[in-house]
Image (tube, helix red, strand yellow):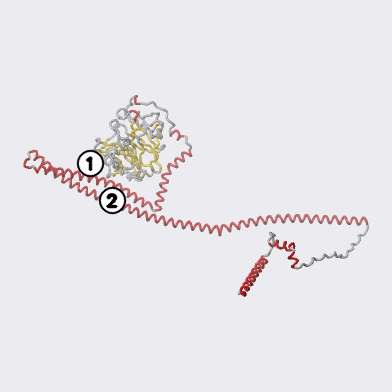
Amino acid sequence: MVIERDGTYILYYSVSSTGSQDSVIGYATSTTMEAGTWTDHGSTGVESTSGASYNAIDPTMILVDGTYRLSFGSYWDDIQLVTFNAEATAADGEPSQTIYKPSGDHDVEASFPFQYGDYFYMFWSEGQANDYDVSRPAEGGEYRVRACRSTDVGGPYTDGTGTSCLQGGGNDVLASHGDVYGPGGQGVLDDPTYGPILYYRYVNTTIGYAVADYQWGWNTVRLRLVLGMIYGVVALGLQYSTPADGTVTWTGPTIGTGNASSNEAKEPPSPSPAPSSPEGPSSATHTRPSRPGPELPSQADSRRSAASQNFSHFMDNLQSRVLVASQALNDLTGYSAIEAIKASNAALEADLARAQADLRRARQHYKAVNARRASTQREVTALLARKDTWAPPDLERFTTMYRQDHELEAAVSEASTALTEAEADEARLSQALNSGILRRYHEEQIWSDRIRRQSTWGTWGLMGVNILLFLVLQFVAEPWKRNRLMKGIAAEEKAALDAVRRELEEVRGAMTRREDDAAAAAAAATAAVVEDVGVEAAPVASLPDVKGPEVPAPPALSWRDFLSDPSLWRPALEDLYSERTIDLRMRDVSLIALEGAITGAVAVAGVAALLARQR
């Protein structure tokens, strides 16, 4: 692992012996990274010996808020994280466990912390890494890349299902597929063009499993981190599909250098060049002919429109915006304090898991020491039973066993003390975790009640707003609308009436003018005739009024004759229930109704009187 600080490159390395915990992490510095310019400064203070809870190898440094953190570890208690000083040259604190696989050989190593957005991702390699040509593990037991995430670089880390990564959790990021076997040894960088890029090494199964006969190839995989979750991987130029039978077939070339790739092709444009193999070119028998691959994503991306690229950029930034909005909502509602309790409980769960592991180890150690002491005591008792027949070797054996029993007695005492402390620590953490869970439950109940009350008041507020809007519409908006409508209708009617009046006045004036012209013409014609004839007009004699003959009135009919002739009363009867429309004043209707009521009352009173008299 190499970092750059103030113009100086710092290289972190580990020195260890295979299969042991006698390991140390050191560092060297250079200003140019050229060969021969490195200065070794020795240990960083991160060391491990036999019996330690971790193995000090595989260092990876990360800078978070101005503080350097070193992630390291392999097998035993797996991945650890320790704070370094401001110069990033020495440990400044005790390591804390971040990733742990409780089952099997704890085969977890090569950790790589990576920050993206508001989350920290811990990548690691899990499984058997070497000796594939001698003893390959069962399917799925070979190297593969896994990861977990956390909101803090120190954890607690969880996978996509919420399982703690101190209890075996983890998301599979990249495993064996096609010709690629045992991918691991990964690193991650955030490329400005492609986003997060995962670099890893693998074994090419098309040319055997031995590692001494060919170069190792390196590949790149583009990670998709969606809303903080590990969503999947997209290979850059390395595409494969999974048919219904479950087999994986390659449809494109791999990316990277070295002749270990199964389908080599020209190197596609990459934001940073892939490292070349330090060894020489491999044998020609290990090289396969290149085949043209499909169009590279970079070529397709170059033809995208500006709107499409802006939309992609917006979607990439949507994660942080959603997280900020979610955090603001939690702060507003008071849920951030509960989130802090949840984080504390998660940390307590991790501490409790470590305490339980320490308790198991302490109990096993105590039992082992006790068993050894009991065996020693039995042998001492057997020697004492035949004391009279001792030979010089028996005396020497007795002395040795007696001294060993004394040492084991002290060891048993120490193991008992350690077991007692481990039990007390486990009980304390268990009690603290239970208290934290109860506290979280209590606080969530209070928060839920408060949200419910706020929801109730919000509902009442919405009802009040609705009522207010109803009143405003009914008593303000609707009357104003009606008045406006009536004024508009009245104005239109007035305009129409004025137009009709004008037309009537024009017609009346025209008729008057015509009558005057006709009268004047008639008078002029009459005067002209009289003057021509010279005869005076005779006076018009008045005629006496002549009375015409009187029409006799129809003869009067009796009721008997009227009722006996239906032609006289039937039209009147049919008119009573006909559809003929009549015009009545309200006063006439009221009088008719009053007369009907009085008539009905008189009829009812008469019938009642008759009935009463008959009784």
**Which residue corresponds to the image point at 41% horizontal and 27% vertical from the top-left?**
291
Q: Which mark is residue 51?
A: 1
Residue 337 place in picture, x, y as percent: 36, 52
Q: CA distance from mark 2 to mark 1?
A: 26 Å
Residue 360 is left or right of residue 525, and the answer is left
Mark 1 is on which residue type? Gly
Whether 303 is drawn above or below 436: the answer is above
Q: How many residues crowd mark 2 within 10 Å: few (<14), some (14–19), many (20+)?
A: some
Q: Tag 1 or tag 2, which sits nearer the N-term?
A: 1
Residue 476 place in picture, x, y as percent: 56, 59
Residue 268 appears in which quarter of the rendering? top left
**Which residue corresponds to the image point at 67% horizontal and 67% vertical from the top-left?**
592
Q: How many residues crowd mark 1 within 10 Å: few (<14), some (14–19), many (20+)?
A: few
The residue beneath circle 2 is 430
Q: Secondary structure at mark 1?
A: loop
The C terminus lies in quadrant: bottom right
Residue 226 versus residue 270: which sits nearer the camera?
226
